[in-house]
Amino acid sequence: MTATANVEQGTINAVVDIAARPEAVFRALTDPKELEAWWGSEDTYRTSDWKIDLRVGGQWSCAAKDPSGGDSDGQGRVLGRGPAAAPGVHVATELGRLCADDRALRA
């Protein structure tokens, strides 16, 4: 994985090479049940109740619960997307608040 951050623009660009078929990766990033299965971990937080509008400009959100039972949420906006069979970027998203006190949650 490579990642670069632009603090002035408030952006992070990450590139990850995943040894899986493009359609499987697309599904893991866009299907609510798939997202619940892998986003977070038992020692950081678990997500649920994913809502995703995959249209460009669409919103996504989820609930999150930390190991102590504290509730928070995640939200963002879809900036762009490609077809499931296309190589490269499949979903570009803007992250909003990641948890109730605005601290970063570890993925």
Image (cartoon, rainbow, N blue to C red):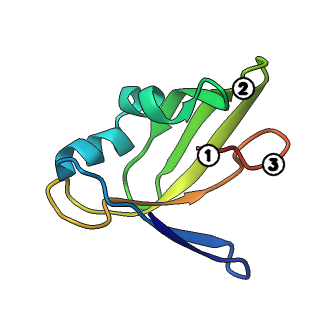
Vertical side of 2 occupied by 51: above or below: above
> In the orientation shown, which residue stands out farthest toward the top?
69
- Write down the residue under mark 3: 102
Q: Are marks 2 and 1 in contact (CB under 8 Å)?
A: no
Q: Secondary structure at mark 3?
A: loop
Query: Which three-letter amino acid code belongs to the residue tagged 2?
Result: Asp
Q: Look at discs 1 and 3 and give the one toward the viewer.
A: 3
Vertical side of 97 occupied by 39: above or below: above
Q: Is 4 situated left or right of 53 in this image?
A: right
Q: CA distance from mark 1 to mark 3?
A: 12 Å
In which quadrant is the C terminus drawn?
A: top right
Q: Is 4 situated left or right of 45 in this image?
A: left
- Camera-side residue of 41 and 32: 41
- Write down the residue under mark 2: 66
Q: Look at discs 2 and 3 and give the one toward the viewer.
A: 2
In which quadrant is the N terminus drawn?
A: bottom left
Residue 96's disc is none
Q: Earlier in the sequence, mark 2 or mark 3?
A: 2
The location of residue 85, given as percent across then percent down, is: 14, 56
Query: Which three-letter amino acid code belongs to the residue tagged 1?
Result: Gln
Query: Which three-letter amino acid code belongs to the residue tagged 3?
Result: Asp
Q: Quadrant of residue 83?
A: bottom left
Residue found at x 37% / y 54%: 55
Residue found at x 80% / y 38%: 100
